Amino acid sequence: DGWSTGVTGILKAGDFLQLGSGTATRLHMVLADANSNGSGEATLDIWPSVRREGVADNAPLTLSNPRGTFRLAQNVNVWRLEAPFRGNFSFEAKEAI
């Protein structure tokens, strides 16, 4: 709740949002466009689903520069540098729970 009323596409599929802060920070992606109703409420289809600990009523959503907490899956990274000095860097990360 707390959205502007009656807005179509208040959040779009592919948008990211953050729930929580500090070590409880969780990053979620919106799976389907969401609209706010006449009361300023919106139902969000997000991935991953909210865990058992849930989200407190009226807990804030961070929509600008949302973050999550992740760890490297392995102590390995791969990178290469090609002319004209374009670089690629890849790594695998998992959410820190």
Image (spheres, rainbow, N blue to C red):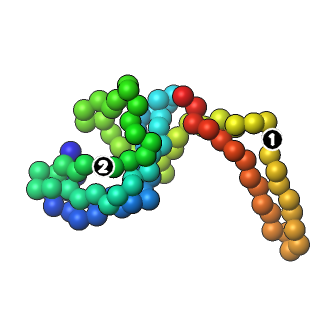
First in sequence, mark 1 or 2: give its number: 2
Relative placement, left or right, of 84 versus 28 is right
In the picture, the quarter occupied by the C terminus is top right
- Residue 18 at x, y percent in the picture: 43, 43
The outermost residue toward the left is: 38
- The x, y position of residue 58, in whole percent, is 25, 36
Helix, strand or loop at mark 2: loop
Residue 69 is situated, as x and y percent measured from the top left of the image, at 56, 36
Q: Nearer the viewer, residue 65 or 81?
A: 81
Regarding residue 2, the answer to whether it shows in the image is no
Disc assigned to residue 44: 2
The residue type indicated by label 1 comes to Val
Residue at point 86% right, 74% down? 84
- 10 Å crowding of disc 1: few (<14), some (14-19), many (20+): few
Which residue is located at x 23 percent, y 65 percent? 8
Q: Amino acid at mark 2?
A: Leu
Residue with the mark numbered 1: 76
Q: Is residue 38 above or below residue 94?
A: below
User: Residue at the location (57% across, 36% down)?
Assistant: 95
Residue depicted at 51% across the width and 44% down the height: 67
In the rendered image, the residue lying farthest to the bottom is 84
Residue 31 occupies which quadrant of the picture? bottom left
Please say if 80 is above or below 66: below
Q: Report the quarter where the N terminus lies.
A: top left
> Alpha-carbon distance for marks 1 and 2?
36 Å
